[in-house]
Image: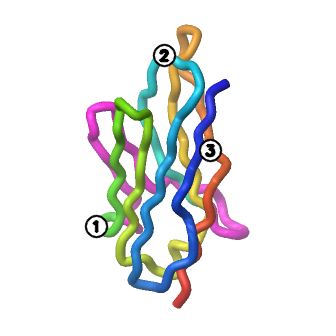
């Protein structure tokens, strides 16, 4: 069974930093794009950052210059370094990946990790 497990959330003051990590486990053939989403209370889930297998990254305008997504293809992990955090970054952060199994790609999600930024 394929699983994505996030870690690294927590409580931090505005201006601080956190690093989120996500590891894929189980039996699968390969991983394509990996992403981080976030969902604040009462709001929709929004895409934060995407990284391709080659390391090409894209970011939401709201986090550009503050967040950095990276991945380790050998360890099947993706990370999100979050700097200069703001109260509006408070949300549950979800890891997402396109994982190839049985000849096709499927969409997998982690369980989410809470990030709270106090003012």
Residue at horizontal 56 percent and vertical 15 percent from the top: 101
Q: Quadrant of residue 41?
A: bottom right
Q: Secondary structure at mark 2?
A: loop
| N-terminal-most mark, 1 or 2 | 2
Q: Quadrant of the N terminus?
A: top right
Residue count near mark 3 (Cα–Cα under 10 Å), binned few <14, some 14–19, many ≥20: some
Is 62 on the left-hand or right-hand side of 106? Answer: left
Q: Nearer the viewer, residue 77 or 95?
A: 77
Residue count near mark 2 (Cα–Cα under 10 Å), binned few <14, some 14–19, many ≥20: few
Residue at horizontal 57 percent and vertical 58 percent from the top: 93
Q: Position of residue 69 (x, y in %)?
A: 36, 52
Q: How many angstroms separate mark 1 from mark 2 (CA)?
A: 33 Å
Q: Nearer the viewer, residue 3 or 108?
A: 3
Q: Position of residue 96 (x, y in %)?
A: 54, 41
Q: What residue is pinned by disc 2?
A: 29
Report if the CB atoms under discs 2 and 3 are less than 8 Å apart: no
Q: Position of residue 99 (x, y in %)?
A: 52, 26
Q: Is residue 8 above or below residue 73?
A: below
Closer mark to the observer between disc 3 and disc 1: 3
Q: Is residue 58 above or below residue 19?
A: above
Q: Secondary structure at mark 3?
A: loop
Residue 110, numbered circle: 3
Q: Nearer the viewer, residue 56 or 79?
A: 79
| N-terminal-most mark, 2 or 3 | 2
Q: Which residues are magenta?
A: 39-63
The tally of labels here is: 3
Q: How many angstroms separate mark 3 from mark 1 (CA)?
A: 25 Å
Residue at horizontal 67 percent and vertical 48 percent from the top: 111
Q: Secondary structure at mark 1?
A: loop
Residue 65, numbered circle: 1
Q: Quadrant of residue 62?
A: bottom left
Q: How many angstroms separate mark 2 from mark 3 (CA)?
A: 18 Å
């Amino acid at each position: 069974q394929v699983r994505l497990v996030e870690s690294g959330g927590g409580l931090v003051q505005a201006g601080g930093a956190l690093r989120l990590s996500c590891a894929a486990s189980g039996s699968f053939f390969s991983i394509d794009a990996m992403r981080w989403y976030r969902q604040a209370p009462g709001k929709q889930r929004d895409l934060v950052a995407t990284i391709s297998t080659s390391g090409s990254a894209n970011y939401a305008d709201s986090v550009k210059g503050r967040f950095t997504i990276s991945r380790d293809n050998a360890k099947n992990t993706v990370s999100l370094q979050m700097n200069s955090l703001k109260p509006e970054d408070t949300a549950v952060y979800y890891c997402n990946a396109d994982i190839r199994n049985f000849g096709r790609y499927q969409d997998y999600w982690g369980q989410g990790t809470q990030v709270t930024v106090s003012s």
